[in-house]
Image: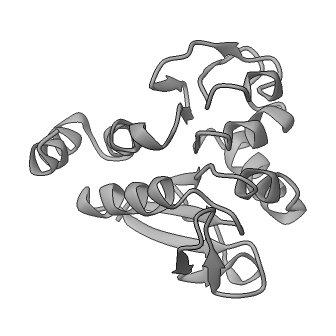
């Protein structure tokens, strides 16, 4: 079974996190939420709490087909400040496996140098942190094994692109039909 991990930091964007997990699971992708804090309970940018499936320090990501970062503030900055997560992302990227981020979270990939020479998109105002990227402003951008999304209102296209890349276009279309999108 295909596997994805979505990382939760204090201040994550709730729509992006929960919406993406929902779409991935509808697509038959085993998706686990991972707290980068020392607690399973993580508070989002709008004070909605989520209970993560596991803690970063307890996880083995060797089976990951995709690693996903939701945006939100200060969630994106908290993701960026997490050295163990940064190491996991670099390892995934070097293996040629999917790394994905939406909204402000592409700043993490940019600051790691993972967007150099790649097309990318992000929430307006964060373009300067996507170091070396060709900013397209599109809703969703896929460049090889890197997927970026623009913001919370675009979580459905972002999630569907992940399903398409991880599983298939047919599965993504099936999920889209069920979502009436």
Residue at x 53% of width, y 72% of height: 33
Residue at 47% in and 44% down: 152
Q: Nearer the viewer, residue 58 or 47?
A: 47
Above or below: residue 140 compared with residue 158: above
Determine which quarter of the picture holds residue 136. top right
Residue at the front extreme of this rendering: 46
Name above or below for residue 83 compared with residue 157.
below
| Quadrant in the rendering for residue 1 | bottom left
Q: How many marks?
A: 0
Q: Position of residue 35 (x, y in %)?
A: 66, 75
- Report x, y in % for residue 8: 63, 67
Compared with 181, 86 (above or below) is below
Side (left or right) of 181 relative to 98 = left
Pick whichever, 106 or 112, lies toward us: 106
Q: Can you give x and y, in whole percent of width and height, for residue 161 in the image?
A: 37, 36
- Left or right: where does residue 42 sit relative to residue 63? right
The reply, left or right, for residue 127 in relation to residue 172 is: right
- 14 vs 56, left or right, is left
Give the x, y percent position of residue 50: 53, 78
Question: Residue 9's quadrant in the figure?
Answer: bottom right
């Amino acid at each position: 079974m295909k596997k994805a991990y979505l990382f939760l930091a204090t201040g994550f964007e709730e729509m992006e996190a929960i919406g993406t997990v929902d779409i991935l699971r509808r697509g038959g992708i085993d998706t686990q939420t991972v707290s980068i804090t020392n607690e399973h309970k993580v508070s989002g940018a709008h004070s909605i709490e989520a209970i993560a499936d596991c803690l970063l320090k307890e996880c083995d990501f060797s089976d990951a087909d995709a690693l996903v970062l939701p945006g939100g503030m200060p969630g994106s900055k908290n993701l960026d400040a997490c050295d163990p997560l940064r190491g996991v992302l670099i390892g995934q990227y070097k293996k040629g496996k999917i790394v994905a981020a939406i909204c402000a979270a592409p700043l993490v990939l940019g600051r790691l140098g993972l967007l150099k020479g790649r097309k990318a998109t992000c929430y307006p105002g964060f373009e300067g942190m996507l170091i070396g990227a060709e900013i397209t402003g599109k809703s969703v951008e896929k460049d090889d094994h890197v997927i970026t999304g623009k913001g919370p209102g675009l979580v459905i296209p972002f999630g569907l692109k992940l399903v398409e890349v991880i599983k298939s276009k047919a599965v993504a279309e099936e999920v889209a039909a069920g979502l009436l999108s």
